[in-house]
Amino acid sequence: MTTTPLSAGGPRVSVVADLGGTTLRLGRVAGGVLDAASVRRIPTEGIGRHRTLPAQVLQDQVVEQLAGELEAYLRSPYGAGADSVGVSFAGPLSKDGTVLAGPTLWGGTAAPLPVTDILARRLPVPVVVANDITAAAWRYAATETVPFCLITVSSGIGNKVFRHGEVLIDEAGHGGEIGHWRVDPRPDAMPCECGGRGHLGGIASGRGVLLAARGAAADDPAGFAGSALAGPAGHRPDGITNQSLALAVRAGDPFATTVLSDCLLPLAQAVDCLFTAIGIRRYLFIGGFAVAVGTPFLRLLGDQLARLGCFGLDERQIRDMLALGAADDDHSLIGMARMVAHTLPAPTAAGGRR
C-alpha cells in the first residue's frame, strides 16, 4: 500500500465504504464529518442474495462489486478531491489486510482474500482496510474515556476491545469474533453462516432470534396466536420479521420478550467471560437488531447478566456496564475515516492522485 501524500492541503477527504452481509454503503468524510447526503446504499451481492452459489464464486462477486463501486464513486462529484479510501469489511483480517473469512458475505470456505492489495492496484488513492467492528470502535474511541468492548448485534455478532489507543487483535486477525464462540455443543444446534453449529452469532443475532421466534411460534400455536406477532405475521410463523419482533418486544409482548430473553443468555455469558477474563467494564451495543429493540435489549441482557453474576460487582454495577451506541448505521463509516486519519500521513500540497 502506498502512503504518499496526495491531496493539495486542507482537511483530509476520504471516501469510506462499509461492506456488510446485507448492504454495501459508501460515503464521503471531510474533516472528520460524514456528509449524510453522500451516503449510498447498495445490496451486497453475497450470500444474502445468492444462497445457492459456491463460496468462492460469491467472494469473487463481492470483491468485484466493492472495487467497481469504489471506482465509480471516486469518479462521481462526491469523490472529487478525495485523498484516501477506507473500507470496513465484515470478516476477520490479518495485519497485512488479508480477509481470512466472510461468513455473512460468502458463507463457507474460500481462499484468503488480499483485499488491500486488490483495491490498491485498482484505486488511484491510498487504501486502508479494517474489520468493520475494528473501524466502528474508532468512532467511539474519540468519546469513551475508559477501555471498552464494542459489540454489534445484527445479522451476526462481532466484537472488539479498545484499550490504550488500540484494538486488541493479533497480527493474524484473531480476536473480536465472539459470534463464532460455540455456546451450544449439540450436533443439531442452531446453524451459523460460517458452516458451524451452536455459535453465539447463530443464536443471539438478529437472524438467530428470528429463527428462534419462528420456531417458538410453530411449537406453541396458542401462545403465538395471543402474541402481538401474530397479526403482522398473518398468523404464520414464517411471517414473523425482525421488525415486527423488535416492535413486539418494545411493546412488552410476553411471547416475543421471552424468546429474546432466552436468546440473550449466551450473549450475557460472553460479556461475563470478557469481564472476568480481562476486566473490561464498559460494553457498547450497536447493530441493526440491538438498536431496533433499544432499551428493552439492554434491560433483558442486564437481567440475564445479573442472574449470572459478575465476580466482585453488585447488580447496579453490572447493569451500568451496558449501553447502546448511536442509533444510526454510520459507525463503521465514521470510524473508518478516523482510522484512515490515524494511519495515513496528513495530506499536503505535494502531488496529486497517483
Image (cartoon, rainbow, N blue to C red):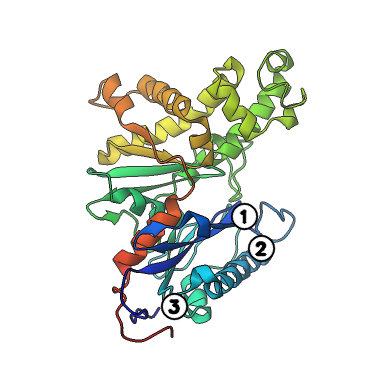
Q: Residue at x 51, y 24 (%)?
A: 261
User: What kind of residue is marked 2?
Assistant: Leu
From the viewer's perspective, is the residue at label 1 or at label 3 nearer?
Answer: 3
From the viewer's perspective, is the residue at label 1 or at label 2 nearer?
Answer: 2
Measured along the vertical axis of the image, is residue 266 above or below residue 40?
above
Measured along the vertical axis of the image, is residue 121 above or below residue 226?
below
User: What kind of residue is marked 1?
Assistant: Gly
**Would residue 181 be visible to someone looking at this image?**
no
Q: Residues within 10 Å of mark 1 (few under 14, many from 20)?
A: many
Q: Which of the labelled discs sits on residue 125, or is there none?
A: 3
Instruction: Give the SS element for disc 3.
Output: loop
Q: CA distance from mark 1 to mark 3?
A: 30 Å
Q: Which of the labelled discs sits on residue 107, or is there none?
A: 1
Q: Nearer the viewer, residue 234 or 161?
A: 234
Disc 2 marks which residue? 58
Query: On the rendered image, what quadrant is the C terminus found in?
Result: bottom left
Measured along the vertical axis of the image, is residue 353 above or below residue 22?
below
